[in-house]
Image (cartoon, rainbow, N blue to C red):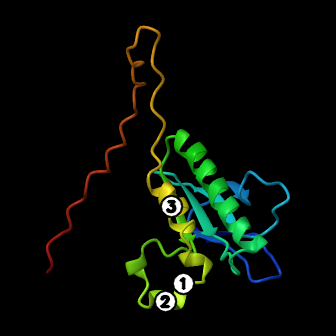
Amino acid sequence: GGDNVAGPGQTSSNGVALLSKTPLEDVTKGLPGDDGDDHARYLEAVVSGPRPVRVASIYLPNGNPVGSEKFAYKLRWLARLNAHARDLLALEEPLVLAGDYNVIPEPDDADNQAAWAGDALFQPETPPAFRALNWLRPPHPPIAPDGAPPPSPPRALPAAPPPRTPRPPPP
């Protein structure tokens, strides 16, 4: 098959894209939660195939300079990403959130911490907002009125691979 490409365009320096050998379905351009946000920083699609997976390409705002609207936007964007990730986990399907997070998660991740001291990637508010994504888990099943968890729905077993045809020995 041919390549399948999706990517919102923007004339500035922002941009994300997805490229797949199988068709892309359920394409979402832009991070939900702010209809006025037209930055090309989020793209999501289901990569079809025998085992479909939902993939998001992320370009989190840099946030510089600190103390500006750009830094506040970065923190709001992270909060929206966290909320959307929770919604995606509720779908209970394979999920990949990949891209440029523009975060220095731990001080030891910077070779020269002093050089990053005034940068939005290294501010004390940024790592906890980023780490919150790492701790997201699928929602717990609802509890029945008698306190017992509901029965699990039956899961379809994956199809067995086709039998291998032995190769003839070399001459």
Contact between marks 3 and 2 (CB within 8 A): the answer is no
The residue under label 1 is 117
The residue lying toward the viewer, choosing from 9 and 124, is 124
**Which residue is at the front of the view, 3 or 27?**
27
Residue drawn at x 44%, y 91% is 112
Percent position (x, y) of residue 89? 52, 44
Q: Is residue 43 visible?
A: no
What amino acid is at disc 3? Pro
Instruction: Where is residue 134? Give x, y as percent.
Output: 45, 57
Q: Residues within 10 Å of mark 2 (few under 14, many from 20)?
A: few
Q: What amino acid type should be assigned to the residue bearing mark 1?
A: Ala
Where is mark 2, residue-wise?
Answer: 114
Mark 3 and mark 1 lie on one chain; the one further toward the N terminus is 1
Residue at 74% x, 60% y: name it. 29
Q: Nearer the viewer, mark 3 or mark 2?
A: 2
Given this view, does label 3 or label 1 mark the residue nearer the observer? 1
Q: Nearer the viewer, residue 162 or 97?
A: 97
Taking the image as shown, residue 56 lies to the left or right of residue 140, namely right
Q: Is residue 64 left or right of residue 123?
A: right
The amino acid beneath tag 2 is Ala
Of 42 and 54, the residue lying toward us: 42
- Name the image quarter holding residue 121: bottom right
Can you see residue 122?
Answer: yes
**Quarter assignment of residue 86:** top right
Q: Quadrant of the N terminus?
A: bottom right
Q: Residue at x 57, y 51 (%)?
A: 85
Q: Marks 3/1: CA distance?
A: 16 Å
Q: Are marks 3 and 1 in contact (CB under 8 Å)?
A: no
Residue identified by numbered label 3 = 128
Query: Can you tell which mark lies on residue 158?
Result: none
Q: Position of residue 8 (x, y in %)?
A: 76, 69
